[in-house]
Each structure stands twice: as C-alpha cells, then as structure tokens.
C-alpha cells in the first residue's frame, strides 16, 4: 500500500510538503505531473494536475527518492506546493484516487523507516521527541539521541550489566 500525508504541519503557510511513499509512488508522480519521473534527489519545478488531467492544482517543486535511498527505504516523493488548505486538499484528493494509495496514519513514515531497517527504535523515538519539542533543552536532547551518542552510552551500560549478570549467575551456579 502506498501512503501519503502532509508532512509540513497543518494550517496555511507559504509552503506545504506532501510526502508519498510506497510501490505506487512513481505512478503518483507520473499521474500528478503528466510527465516522466524527474531525476532522483534533484528539486524539479513541475505543474501538478488533478488526476492526470489538464486542470492544474498548483505549480511547485518535486523531489524523487527511489528505493532504497529514501527516508522510508521505499520509493518516496515530496511535493512542495503552496500551503493553502485548498491546494493541500486538492493534492490529497488526487493522490487518493490512485489505486492502492491511502492517507498515512500519524508516524507511519517513521514506522516504515524502522521496519525497513533505515533507522533503529531509539532514533524513531527521538524523531517524535524532536517534532514535539517545545524548548531548547528538549530539542538538544532529541538531537543528541538522534545522533547516536546516547545509543553508544546505553550500549555500554548494557554490556556492563550483562557482564555483571553473568558473574552473578556464575556465583549462584558455582558457590565454591
């Protein structure tokens, strides 16, 4: 199943990012733009049309990330459009009419990245912490965990605990 969602947050803004991930991503790009796939990882200016028709929704930037070199590990595209509610709704409606495409659940892009081995559980949780951070201290802590520094410390503690546990088990099994 291919998923899509607004990734830039709700409300009117200058720019909105709509992310699409899954097997049908290439088809979504071709239907919405009416053209062939853009070059991978290159921001490309395109017109976005309703359901592959002639009625234009908006003109914006698309970035295409073929699998496995994407955030989710699947084919992924980002549509950068103007951030009005009408544009976002028209894009969502057009994408949802493509077979096997549905609106993503909250956190589903990160869930797929975890399931596809692109990130570990600690990094997935730190991404959620970073998104919801409200203070500078929260932001710094989330970035620290995301960078892997905390994972190294946790793994070191784990190794020490396992070593101590093996000594305790040996003392229980062989008291003399």
Image (cartoon, rainbow, N blue to C red):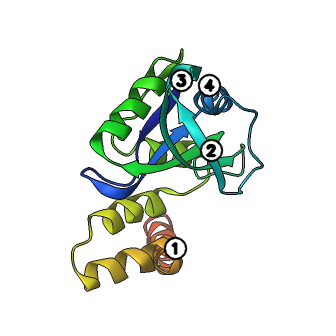
Instruction: Give the label on residue 64, or none.
Output: none
Disc 1 from disc 4: Cα separation: 47 Å
User: Looking at this view, is 51 or 109 the one in front?
Assistant: 51
In x, y percent, where is residue 175? Answer: 45, 72
Is 51 situated left or right of 145 in this image? right
- Which comes sooner in the sequence, label 3 or label 4? 3
Q: Quadrant of residue 126?
A: bottom left
- Residue under circle 2? 46
- Residue under circle 3? 1
Q: Residues within 10 Å of mark 1 (few under 14, many from 20)?
A: few
- Which comes sooner in the sequence, label 2 or label 4? 4
Disc 3 from disc 2: Cα separation: 25 Å
Instruction: Tell me what residue is drawn at x 58 percent, y 40 percent.
Output: 47
- Residue under circle 4? 31
Mark 2 or 4: the one toward you: 2
Disc 3 from disc 1: Cα separation: 35 Å
User: Looking at this view, is 92 or 139 the one in front?
Assistant: 92
Disc 1 from disc 2: Cα separation: 46 Å
Q: Is residue 153 above or below residue 42?
A: below
- Residue under circle 1? 155
């Amino acid at each position: 199943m291919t998923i899509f969602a607004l990734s830039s947050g709700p409300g009117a803004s200058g720019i909105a990012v709509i992310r699409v991930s899954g097997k049908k991503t290439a088809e979504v790009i071709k239907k919405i733009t009416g053209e062939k796939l853009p070059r991978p990882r290159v921001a490309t200016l395109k017109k976005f049309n309703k359901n592959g028709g002639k009625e234009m929704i908006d003109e914006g930037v698309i970035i295409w990330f073929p699998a496995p070199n994407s955030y989710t590990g699947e084919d992924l595209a980002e549509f950068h459009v103007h951030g009005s509610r009408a544009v976002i709704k028209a894009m969502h409606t057009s994408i949802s009419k493509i077979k096997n495409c549905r609106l993503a659940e909250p956190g589903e892009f990160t869930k797929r990245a975890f399931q596809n081995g692109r990130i570990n559980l600690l990094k997935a949780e730190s991404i959620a912490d970073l998104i919801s951070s409200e203070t500078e201290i929260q932001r710094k802590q989330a970035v620290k965990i995301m960078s892997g520094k905390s994972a190294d410390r946790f793994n070191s503690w784990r190794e020490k605990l396992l070593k101590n546990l093996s000594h305790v088990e040996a003392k229980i099994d062989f008291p003399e």
